Image (cartoon, rainbow, N blue to C red):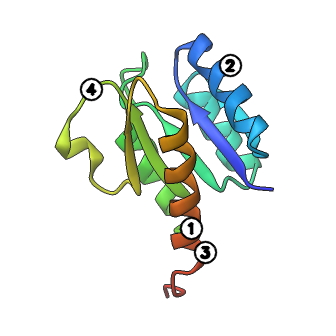
Amino acid sequence: MHTILIVDDNQDFLEVMQDLLSLEGYDVLLAPSMQEALVLLDSRNIDVLLTDLRLPENDMTGPTLLSVVREKSLTTVCILVSGWYDVSAHKGFDAYLPKPLCAPVMFKTIRECLASKTHAPEQS
């Protein structure tokens, strides 16, 4: 079972995402802040990170969190989920999903990203 970490400051969004992704068979972890996300990233093996672009903390954004994840793991799928479209912010992410989300598109994107990471050659 793949583990997905969702980072977003909107509690309603987190709960809906947890319900949707759990029904698809994923183990879902929720982090309403970057600090909580960092704790989970240090303590759990995360297969997929779904993160918002902007959160209330002034010191971290989705791209900042991406940098932390990439230092820890090249195989974690990182997907930016945001209502803000900022081309420069998408750099380095495996995919971008606009809010409001379309569940079938999200499921397909996650599956495709996981498949591409699974079949990617080892990097040294």
Amino acid type shown at disc 4: Trp
Q: Which residue is mark 1?
A: 75
Q: Which residue is mark 4?
A: 84
Label 1 residue SS: loop
Q: Nearer the viewer, mark 1 or mark 3?
A: 3
Label 3 residue SS: helix
Q: Residue visible at 58% across and 29% down? A: 35
Residue 29, given in percent of the width and then of the height, sits at: 72, 35
Q: Is residue 83 visible?
A: yes
Q: Which residue is mark 3?
A: 118
Work out whether mark 1 precedes mark 3 in sequence or the reverse, and give the earlier one. 1
Task: Say above or below: 94 vs 6.
Answer: below
Separation of marks 2 and 3 at Cα, in angstroms = 28 Å
Q: Which residue is mark 2?
A: 15
Most foreground residue, 49 or 25? 25
Work out whether mark 2 precedes mark 3 in sequence or the reverse, and give the earlier one. 2
Work out whether mark 2 precedes mark 4 in sequence or the reverse, and give the earlier one. 2
